[in-house]
């Protein structure tokens, strides 16, 4: 148990440079290049030498995945990180499934079935993909798949999830942090609030957060100076 009074931290000074670095890391991490450049210009920060190239390579991949153009996202990913998808089968499956979904939504059912047989069915040899395959194939049984029980697979939220996973994987492949400093600080804040609630019995809100919430503030700020979001 923690032996502390949270009120003792109410007047702790926050370094402006740390705040700027956290904001910049979020913008870069999410490929908001124009906004990041404007932020740098307005704050007078020093622009990292390598981050524009990094954004220029990741941004189209992220947006192609987000738009459902998974085959183009796969092509560019293989150019940037040639063996990433070979190493990350889950991500590869998710990207292929996006293309399948686009075919289904376009009512190209024959093409979707052929694509599934050639690209998705081989994943069925691994047990963990069987249920996912069944869900995707079930979409073909509905004239209006968006009204099927698997409608979430057609949603923008699903695309966003896959696009985010791809972006994080590319960053990790390049030995960069896969979560921005802001995300990690939010993660740590959630852990601290939970600990305080357990210690003092004070109610706290709940929120959905990515994994790995155990990084310190100083470490997050340093690591994420030029992260993707």
Image (spheres, helix red, strand yellow):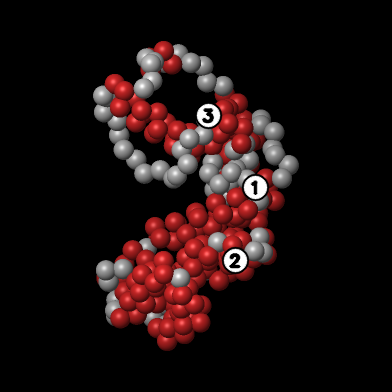
Residue 71 figure quarter: bottom right
In the picture provided, is 179 more to the left or to the right than 141? Answer: right
Residue 111 location (% of width, % of height): 46, 84
Q: Nearer the viewer, mark 2 or mark 3?
A: 2
Mark nearer the N terminus (1 vs 3): 1
Mark nearer the N terminus (1 vs 2): 2
Residue 218 figure quarter: top right
Give the numbered dot on residue 86.
Answer: 2
Q: Residue at x 46, y 82 (%)?
A: 117
The N terminus lies in quadrant: top left
Residue 68 location (% of width, % of height): 48, 67
Whether residue 42 is visible to the viewer of this picture, yes or no, is no
Residues at marks 1 and 2 touching, judged by CB atoms closer than 8 Å: no
**Local SS, label 2:** helix
Residues at marks 2 and 3 touching, judged by CB atoms closer than 8 Å: no
From the image, tell me which residue sits under label 1. Answer: 175
Q: Residues within 10 Å of mark 2 (few under 14, many from 20)?
A: few
Residue 21 location (% of width, % of height): 59, 33
Q: Residues within 10 Å of mark 3 (few under 14, many from 20)?
A: some
**Local SS, label 1:** loop
Does 196 appear above or below 164? above
Give the numbered dot on residue 91.
Answer: none
Residue 170 location (% of width, % of height): 60, 55
């Amino acid at each position: 148990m923690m032996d502390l009074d949270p009120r003792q931290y109410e007047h702790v000074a926050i370094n402006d440079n740390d705040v700027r670095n956290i904001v910049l890391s979020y913008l870069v991490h999410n490929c908001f290049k124009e906004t990041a450049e404007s932020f740098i210009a307005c704050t007078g920060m020093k622009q990292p030498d390598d981050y524009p190239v990094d954004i220029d390579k990741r941004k189209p991949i992220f947006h192609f995945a987000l738009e459902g153009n998974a085959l183009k996202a796969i092509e560019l990913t293989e150019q940037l990180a040639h063996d990433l998808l070979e190493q990350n089968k889950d991500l590869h499956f998710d990207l292929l499934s996006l293309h399948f979904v686009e075919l289904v939504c376009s009512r190209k059912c024959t093409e979707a079935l052929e694509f599934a047989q050639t690209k998705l069915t081989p994943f069925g040899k691994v047990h963990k993909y069987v249920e996912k395959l069944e869900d995707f194939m079930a979409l073909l049984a509905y004239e209006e798949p968006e009204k099927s029980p698997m409608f979430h697979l057609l949603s923008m939220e699903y695309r966003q999830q896959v696009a985010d996973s791809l972006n994080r994987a590319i960053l990790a492949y390049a030995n960069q942090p896969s979560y921005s400093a802001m995300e990690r600080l939010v993660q740590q804040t959630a852990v601290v609030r939970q600990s305080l609630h357990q210690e003092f019995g004070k109610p706290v809100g709940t929120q959905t957060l990515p994994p790995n919430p155990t990084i310190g503030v100083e470490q997050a700020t340093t690591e994420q100076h030029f992260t993707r979001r």
